[in-house]
Image: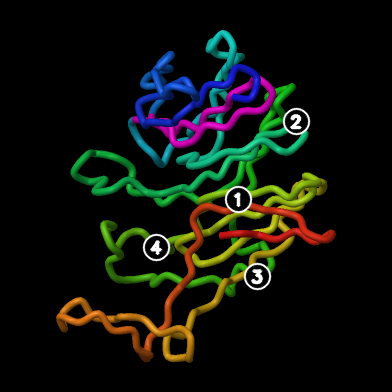
Amino acid sequence: DERTDPLWLAGVVGVDVLSRRTGQPLAHISVTNYGAVNSVAIHEGLAALAVENGSDRTLPGVVLFYDTRTRRQSGAPVSVGALPDMLTFTPNGKQVLVANEGTPNQRPAAAGLSADDPIGSVSLIDVRSRSVQTLPIDPSIPGYDTLRQFPTTGTLPTQPASFSPYGPEPEYIAIDKSGRFAYVGLQEANGIAVLDLRSRRFEKIYSLGLKDFSLPGNEIDPSDQDGRIELRSAAVKGLYQPDTLATYEHRGRTYLVM
């Protein structure tokens, strides 16, 4: 927090506020009444927390706002999409964008929970009015069909076969310097969605394609069973699957770092 200097750290059961100079704890903000906090962002004395539903992650989550000086909640919780995983303010601070990952519950039958696989989405919150618009990541977006496709049958890791299809799940959001475009990482689907913040519509989804480890310069050590450390060409391909994103501007162009 640039105004008061402490660090705000998201830690699942709540946010820990630490002295930036000494590392000593200053406060703990519990969010257990709402769920688990996944992300915190701050703009000019206002903190926003992304909190997933604590009892059933397929249900809508909330964004909580706090005054960084008093550390008191500012206004009512704002309902967003399922499993808000990350959030960020636009450069002017007027909006908060939330990446709703929409991940299904693990082993839902054993816990008596929903077996639904929610649609991943991005929520746009107007900071002043606290109104919210949630945009789904769905096949209507140009380029959706270029993404990594998941099987419609069979068992996926840690998930029962009933989850079909397994749609793109927003992981992280980076906004350009002008506040015109937001770039949304779709990690498991190996793609990036471009969101026009003026029209509030997704412009396009870009697949990140494959990395060919058989090409010169892309050598890897593909085995942990041969007792050797050896980089070599291998007839395999890999997915990039970006997690954290950031943007920067150079000579009038915006670059995305993944």
| Disc ID at residue 164 | 4
Question: Where in the figure is residue 113, as x and y percent of width and height?
Answer: 29, 40
Q: Amino acid at mark 4?
A: Ser
Q: Compare residues 155 and 68 and report the one nearer the observer.
A: 68
Q: Relative to 221, is 98 on the left or the right? A: right
Q: CA distance from mark 2 to mark 3?
A: 29 Å
Residue at x 26%, y 45% (from the top left corner): 108
Hey, which quadrant is residue 214 in on the image? bottom left
Q: For marks 2 and 3, give the one nearer the viewer.
A: 2
Residue at x 37%, y 49% (from the top left corner): 104
**Main structural element of the magenta stretch: helix, strand or loop?**
strand
Question: Where in the figure is residue 105, as x and y percent of width and height?
Answer: 32, 45
Hey, which quadrant is residue 77 in on the image? top right
Q: CA distance from mark 4 to mark 3?
A: 20 Å
- The reply to whether the C-beta atoms of the residues labelled 1 and 3 are less than 8 Å apart is no
| Disc ID at residue 143 | 3
Nearer the N terminus, badge 2 or badge 3? 2
Q: What residue is disc 2 on?
A: 94
Q: Amino acid at mark 1?
A: Pro
Q: What residue is disc 1 on?
A: 136
Nearer the N terminus, badge 2 or badge 4? 2
- The reply to whether the C-beta atoms of the residues labelled 2 and 3 are less than 8 Å apart is no
Nearer the N terminus, badge 1 or badge 3? 1
Q: Secondary structure at mark 2?
A: loop
Residue at x 77%, y 34% (from the top left corner): 92
Q: CA distance from mark 1 to mark 2?
A: 21 Å
Q: Compare residues 57 and 116 and report the one nearer the observer.
A: 57
Q: CA distance from mark 1 to mark 3?
A: 14 Å
Q: Relative to 92, is 81 on the left or the right? A: left
Which residues lie in the magenta part?
36-54
